[in-house]
Image: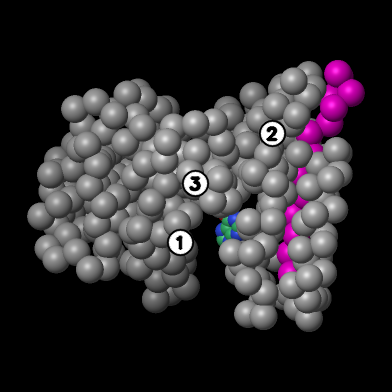
């Protein structure tokens, strides 16, 4: 058996077309959705991510502002910029690219963003809203994974067992909560879990979000399961790969996301969706 591919590029195109339509409708009412992206320092990977985010905004008819600062910027200066953007009515979403230079406290900066503009979904208020099921912004990567599941008819996950591998604040934990919110039975595994395969072999849905190659191999997957690969790693030849042994697992799984072209484009797409939502809420 060969798994069907969940194509993150194709799904992103559909969702971005919807964002573009909503952006155009809101702009016609005099409110152009706006995202501000702050990049501090010279991290080359961050520079690429940020460029892609800004370009995606432009392609969908959103206004975007990129603020780039030297790595020597002080924490107080950055906090002042965040506050100015909180107060700027033309900006509906604020994203501070992580990691920040070591002398700046990430947590303090994220908490300074207004929860009404926290389109990354990283603020404690956004995380708390997810826990209790209130309205708030959902972290983009797990939100994108939920949209991928929906795209194959897995919206209500009642009766299904989902296993999340990874417990980060930006993927693993919010992923588990979103799956729970969709009525799945959820197990969270992590680096301290003995016999990972024992858990994953019971899963109807596996989400791998560890940041390590070949964490999930064919012998660890139930035939027909849905496998979502959040990993972004490089193999020995320098080629982009995920956490899942794609070639092996695709022979066992029912559905699988590729790397690249799977979860990656969905993360940026959900940032656009959140920014659109923030603008619509502000205009309501
Ligand atoms: N660094 C890597 N991914 C992300 C992301 O999704 N948001 C922010 N703010 N920083 C990141």
**Lower position in the chain sequence, tag 3 or tag 1:** 3
Question: Mark 1 packing: few (<14 Cα in 10 Å), some, or many (20+)?
Answer: some
Q: Nearer the viewer, mark 2 or mark 3?
A: 3
Cα distance in 3D space between marks 1 and 2: 28 Å
* Residue identified by numbered label 1: 232
Distance from mark 3 CB to nearest ligand 1 atom below 8 Å:
no
**Residue 87 coordinates in the image, percent (x, y):** 84, 45
Which residue sits at x=33%, y=54%? 208
Residue 161 located within the stretch drawn in magenta: no
Q: Secondary structure at mark 1?
A: loop
Question: Mark 2 packing: few (<14 Cα in 10 Å), some, or many (20+)?
Answer: many
**Residue 66 coordinates in the image, percent (x, y):** 81, 56
**Residue 206 coordinates in the image, percent (x, y):** 27, 46
Q: Which quadrant would the C terminus be assigned to in this image?
A: top right
* Residue identified by numbered label 3: 127
Q: Is residue 45 visible to the viewer in this orientation of the structure?
A: no
Snapshot quadrant of residue 22: top right
Q: Is residue 173 visible to the viewer in this orientation of the structure?
A: yes
Report the side of 145 relative to 21 (left or right). left
Q: In the drawing, what numbered circle is on residue 278?
A: 2
Snapshot quadrant of residue 137: top right
Report the side of 219 relative to 123 (left or right). left
Give, as a single range, the part of the protein colored magenta: 27-40
Report the side of 48 relative to 245 (left or right). right
């Amino acid at each position: 058996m060969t798994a069907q591919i969940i194509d993150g590029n194709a799904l992103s195109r559909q969702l971005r077309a919807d964002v573009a339509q909503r952006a155009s409708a809101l702009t016609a009412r005099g409110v152009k959705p706006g995202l501000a992206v702050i990049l501090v320092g010279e991290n080359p990977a961050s520079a690429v991510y940020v460029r892609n985010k800004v370009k995606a905004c432009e392609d969908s008819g959103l206004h975007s502002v990129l603020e780039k600062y030297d790595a020597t910027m002080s924490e107080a200066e950055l906090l002042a910029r965040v506050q100015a953007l909180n107060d700027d009515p033309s900006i509906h979403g604020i994203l501070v690219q992580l990691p920040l230079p070591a002398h700046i406290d990430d947590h303090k900066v994220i908490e300074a963003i207004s929860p009404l503009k926290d389109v990354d979904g990283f603020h404690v208020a956004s995380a708390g809203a997810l826990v209790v099921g209130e309205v708030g912004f959902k972290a983009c990567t797990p939100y994108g994974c939920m949209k991928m599941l929906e795209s194959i008819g897995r919206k209500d996950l009642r009766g299904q067992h989902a296993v999340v591998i990874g417990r980060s604040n930006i993927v693993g934990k919010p992923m588990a909560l979103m799956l729970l919110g969709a009525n799945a039975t959820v197990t969270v595994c992590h680096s301290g879990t003995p016999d990972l395969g024992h858990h994953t072999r019971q899963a109807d849905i596996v989400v791998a979000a560890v940041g390590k190659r070949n964490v999930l191999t064919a012998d660890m997957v139930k035939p027909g399961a849905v496998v979502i690969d959040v990993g972004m790693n490089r193999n020995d030849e320098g080629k982009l790969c995920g956490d899942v042994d794609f070639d092996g697992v695709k022979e066992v799984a029912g559905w699988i996301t590729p790397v690249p072209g799977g979860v990656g484009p969905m993360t940026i797409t959900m940032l656009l969706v959140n920014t659109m939502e923030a603008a619509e809420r502000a205009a309501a």
